[in-house]
Structures are given as C-alpha cells and as structure tokens.
Image (cartoon, helix red, strand yellow):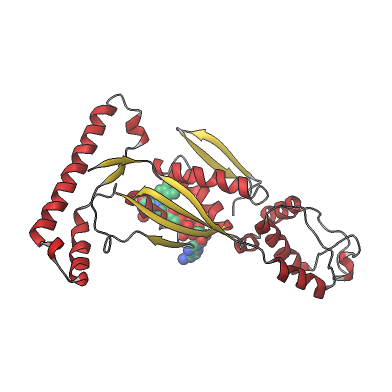
C-alpha cells in the first residue's frame, strides 16, 4: 500500500587515524612528542599531512627549525592551522578526510541531482534486482504548507496507488511470481521499473571527501536548489560541522526560504 516517507540521513563511516603508524613516523622523523589539540582524528590527519609538506612539526622538546632551517615560526593549534589551509585555498590537504552517509527514503529526483557531483562514490538501490511491493514518496514541503495541502496530498496518494496497481498488473501479465529463473525475473523487474515515478523513495550510500562535502553543501543548500536536496544537505552540513568544527569553521548558516542555506568564508 502506498505510503508517505521522510528522508533520513545516517552517518555510517569516516576516516580514522592509525595512531600506531603516526607514532612510528614521529619517532623516526625525530619529533616523537609532537601533539595537536583537536579531538578529531580526521582533523589531526589534515594537520599531519600539511605539516609534513614543510616539515613544520614543533614540540616542547623540538624546534621546527631542526627539521627545516627555513622556518622561524610555526602556526600553533589545529583550528588555526586548518583555518590557514582553508584561507590559502590548499583544498587538496583536506581531501584526505572521507565521510560516508546512507540516505534512506530519499526520492529518485533527489538522487538524480546528487549523482551529478562526480568526485564521490555512490551505491544506489537497484530496481533491476529489487521488485517493488509498496510505493513510498515524500510529500514536498511546499505542498505541505499550501492552503490546498489536503487535496494535493490526495492526488499524490491516488497517483501512487494507481502506479502500484499498474505495477501489479504487469506482474500478473508476466506471471513473474511463478517464474523459476532468477535471470528472467531480473529482466522483467528491470523492464517494469520504467513505469515508476521519479518521486519514488529509494536509498543511496554516498562517500565524499571533506573538500567535496564543503562544495556540495554550498551548492545544494543554496536557495536556488530543490527543497528535498536542501533538506538532506542541511542535515549533513550540521552533522559535519559538529564532527569537524575546524574543517567547517568558516561555514555560516541561515534560514532562507524555509531551509538552512550554508555558505563558506573560504570557498574553493
Ligand atoms: C541550483 C542548481 C541547479 C541546477 N540545474 C541544472 C539543470 O538545469 N540542468 C543540468 O543539467 N544540471 C543542473 N545542475 C547541475 C550542475 O550543472 C552540475 O552538474 C552539478 O551541480 C555538479 O556540480 P559541479 O559542476 O560543481 O561538479 P562536481 O562534480 O560537483 O565537481 C566539483 C568540482 O570539481 C571540479 N571538477 C569536477 N569534474 C571536473 C572536470 N571534468 N573538469 C574540470 N573540473 C572538474 C570543478 O571545480 C567542480 O566544481 C544544477 C545544479 C544546481 C546546484
């Protein structure tokens, strides 16, 4: 039976630091007591990768000039270090950090927009393999607020129910439930999906690095973007800022046209 859904966002993975490896490197490098002040491994990784470029490690017992005589002063603290990377546009350094989100009950409309962002990894529910039983759909916020919301909702429900009936009719005509061959079932399932609407609720897992998350947050929370993708990226933006206050230190948000719009002080 047709039903309404709400898009859901689950953070499912992120970059971890291998401290055994980091400690071994620091001992070999000669700055074994180097430490930083972020509690986030990912932000520490960015600082280590960046400092290794100029050998700008400094600790209580070692001056950076021991490792690079050109250095007279080092930038202290992770927030200040990453702030300088962002300001100077050295975006490649923050590409070491990856986060994965599983987006559940988002529409094919939304995922079609999402996958236009090329520097990412996607795994999407396959409608070649997965035979649909019930149709789920998000009722758009702009309709929810509309004075004729009830009538609009009824039209949505009617369309979804009709779509389900049509799908079941195809299943009956093809006798798909009685087929023994999985290959044949898959062929028919794949063909039948053509009558499904782009509002159909689906699932997609997406992995991006921090530079790309910053880019897509700016593009997709913009008031020019569509409201479902704005809703999803608003949740992702808030979550990433809580996880990585230094990597997202220049991100500012304000409600514009009903959803959070995020902009970056150093956009690159
Ligand atoms: C509000 C809005 C409306 C839109 N409307 C439409 C529309 O009507 N029709 C339509 O077709 N699309 C539309 N799009 C999609 C848009 O055109 C882009 O395809 C999409 O946003 C991907 O963004 P991007 O171009 O920044 O590339 P991404 O894939 O997100 O890549 C990020 C950055 O990496 C760099 N990069 C990536 N690949 C390359 C490359 N091959 N060469 C050089 N540099 C590269 C670029 O600097 C790029 O900005 C819309 C997007 C938005 C946000």
How many numbered marks are there? 0
Q: Left or right: where does residue 120 sit relative to residue 47? A: left
Q: Left or right: where does residue 105 sit relative to residue 32? A: left
Q: Quadrant of ligand 1?
A: bottom left
Quarter occupied by the N terminus: top left
Q: Left or right: where does residue 27 sit relative to residue 193? A: right
Residue lying furthest left in this view?
173
Q: Quadrant of residue 93?
A: bottom right
Residue at 36% across / 54% down in the picture? 112
Residue at 22% across / 32% down in the picture? 154
Vertical position of residue 63 compared to residue 109: above or below: below
Residue lying furthest bottom in this view?
28
Whether residue 89 appears in this view of the structure is: no
Vertical position of residue 141 compared to residue 79: above or below: above
Q: Position of residue 60 (x, y in %)?
A: 90, 60
Q: Position of residue 206 (x, y in %)?
A: 46, 58
Quarter occupied by the C terminus: bottom right
Residue at 33% across / 52% down in the picture? 108
Observer-nearest of 114 and 232 = 232
Residue at 37% across / 48% down in the picture? 106
Residue lying furthest right in this view?
61
């Amino acid at each position: 039976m047709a039903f309404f859904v709400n898009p859901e966002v689950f953070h499912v993975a992120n970059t971890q630091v291998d401290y055994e490896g980091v400690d071994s490197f620091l001992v070999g490098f000669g700055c074994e007591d180097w430490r930083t002040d972020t509690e986030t491994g990912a932000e520490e990784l960015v600082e280590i990768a960046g400092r290794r470029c100029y050998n700008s490690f400094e600790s209580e017992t070692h001056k950076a000039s021991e490792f690079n005589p050109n250095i007279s002063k080092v930038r202290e603290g992770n927030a200040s270090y990453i702030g300088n990377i962002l300001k100077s546009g050295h975006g490649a350094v923050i590409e070491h950090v990856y986060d994965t989100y599983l987006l559940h009950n988002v529409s094919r409309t939304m995922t079609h927009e999402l996958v236009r962002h090329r520097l990412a990894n996607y795994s999407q529910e396959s409608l070649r393999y997965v035979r649909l039983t019930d149709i789920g759909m998000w009722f758009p916020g702009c309709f929810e607020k509309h004075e004729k919301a009830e009538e609009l909702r009824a039209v949505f429900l009617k369309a979804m129910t009709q779509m389900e009936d049509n799908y079941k009719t195809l299943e009956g005509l093809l006798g798909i439930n009685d087929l023994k061959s999985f290959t044949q079932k898959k062929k028919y399932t794949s063909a039948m999906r053509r009558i499904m609407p782009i509002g159909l609720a689906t699932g997609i897992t997406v992995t991006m690095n921090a530079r790309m998350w910053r880019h897509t947050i700016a593009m997709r929370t913009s008031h020019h973007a569509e409201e479902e993708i704005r809703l999803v990226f608003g949740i992702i933006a808030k979550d990433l800022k809580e996880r990585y206050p230094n990597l997202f230190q220049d991100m500012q948000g304000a409600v514009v046209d009903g959803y959070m719009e995020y902009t970056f002080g150093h956009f690159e």
